[in-house]
Image: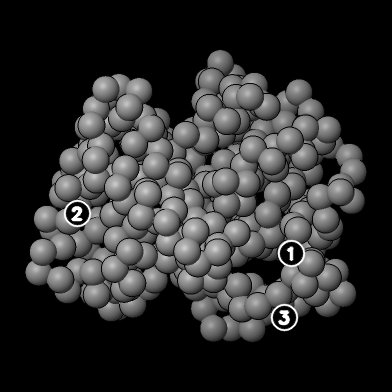
């Protein structure tokens, strides 16, 4: 099975390493020159749970160097890079190539359908975490699981076999009929913590320490739940709110600065249009007012503009 990871960032590198170690034919592509050249010359340095596991030679190249076709493609980019990535990959997708998308945020299925037949789209959500310790260095902790679902389920034989095969590498994939609910639940959490922590300039625990945090959370989740249900998904307020409040302690995620916060600080464009911005767009489609999500989206874009993020 030929597997391509479109994006050799933290999560892409971690999954690629796990599959490579289990004997799968894995290729990485990325555009970060220092990262690509480091892995080309020295291999991917792997540190997991503080243990240095050495350097592993996983094939990596720039997108323009790619050749051949692939059986499975993991899209492991930022949400805003999904469309240009799929444009680049079109020549390398067979009629049977499965494309796995576990990106943060909402609205990716519509984009995927422009390039991939629905029976080849595997949409999902992951609870795995990972990190990079600089160019060519994977530095990850803990474990996780990933839920996926084939968008069109006429024949799921290949997908179910793939899940079983990938789980031998420890990926902890679960084929789930509740994927869209899980996606909305994770998006709701991110709409709150990514947006508010970035605007307030705080970590997750500091947000939770504010005595009025629940009021702020509720204002956003009211819109998320209403829009998600209008989309036909059984979005549950109690689940999202509970997940948010559960991770405030420092021993969990309290000391963590969300990814959108990190992107803002590092001068990168954020994924706000696929979180609060997506809720606002879908709300307009359904005639549901989303003043808080709309305001938050504009504030984040204003910060990007003032900071010169790109």
Left or right? Give the position of 2 relative to 125: right
Q: Name the foreground residue: 224 vs 42.
A: 224
Numbered disc 1: secondary structure: loop
Numbered disc 3: secondary structure: strand
Q: Residue at x 74, y 47 (%)?
A: 4
**Dot label at residue 54:** 3
Give the percent coordinates (x, y) of residue 203: 32, 73
Q: Nearer the viewer, mark 1 or mark 3?
A: 1
Q: Residues within 10 Å of mark 3 (few under 14, many from 20)?
A: few
Mark 1–mark 3 distance (CA, rounded to whole Å): 22 Å
Which is nearer the N-term, disc 3 or disc 2?
3
Left or right? Give the position of 69 relative to 105: right
Q: Residues within 10 Å of mark 2 (few under 14, many from 20)?
A: many
- Disc 1 target residue: 32
Give the percent coordinates (x, y) of residue 303: 43, 61
Q: Residue at x 74, y 70 (%)?
A: 35
Give the percent coordinates (x, y) of residue 41: 87, 74
Numbered disc 2: secondary structure: helix
Residue 172 seen in the current view: yes
- Disc 2 target residue: 217
Quadrant (top left/top right/bottom left/bottom right) for the N terminus: top right
The part of the image, by quadrant, that contains residue 88 is top right
**Dot label at residue 104:** none
Q: Nearer the viewer, mark 3 or mark 2?
A: 2
Q: Residue at x 86, y 49 (%)?
A: 64
The part of the image, by quadrant, that contains residue 115 is top right
């Amino acid at each position: 099975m030929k597997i391509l990871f479109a994006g050799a960032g933290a999560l892409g590198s971690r999954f690629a390493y796990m599959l490579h170690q289990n004997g799968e034919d894995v290729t990485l592509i990325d555009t970060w020159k220092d990262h690509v050249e480091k892995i080309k010359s020295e291999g991917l340095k792997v540190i997991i749970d503080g243990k240095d596991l050495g350097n592993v030679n996983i094939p990596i190249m720039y997108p323009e160097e790619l050749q051949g076709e692939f059986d499975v493609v993991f899209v492991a980019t930022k949400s805003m890079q999904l469309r240009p990535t799929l444009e680049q990959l079109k020549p390398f997708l067979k009629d049977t190539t499965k494309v796995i998308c576990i990106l943060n945020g909402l609205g990716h299925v519509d984009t995927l359908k422009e390039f991939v037949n629905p029976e080849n789209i595997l949409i999902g959500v992951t609870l795995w975490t990972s990190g990079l310790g600089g160019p060519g260095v994977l530095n990850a902790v803990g474990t996780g699981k990933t839920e996926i679902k084939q968008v069109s389920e006429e024949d799921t034989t290949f997908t179910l076999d793939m899940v079983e095969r990938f789980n031998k590498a420890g990926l902890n994939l679960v084929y789930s009929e509740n994927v869209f609910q899980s996606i909305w639940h994770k998006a709701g959490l991110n709409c709150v913590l990514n947006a508010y922590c970035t605007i307030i300039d705080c970590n997750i625990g500091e947000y939770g320490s504010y005595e009025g945090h629940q009021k702020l959370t509720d204002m956003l989740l009211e819109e998320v739940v209403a829009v998600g249900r209008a989309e036909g998904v059984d979005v549950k307020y109690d689940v999202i709110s509970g997940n948010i409040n559960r991770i405030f302690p420092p021993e969990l995620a309290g000391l963590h600065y969300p990814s959108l916060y990190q992107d803002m600080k590092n001068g990168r464009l954020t994924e706000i249009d696929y979180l609060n911005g997506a809720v606002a767009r879908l709300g307009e489609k359904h005639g549901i007012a989303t003043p808080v999500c709309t305001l938050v989206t504009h504030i984040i874009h204003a910060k990007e503009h003032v900071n010169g993020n790109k």
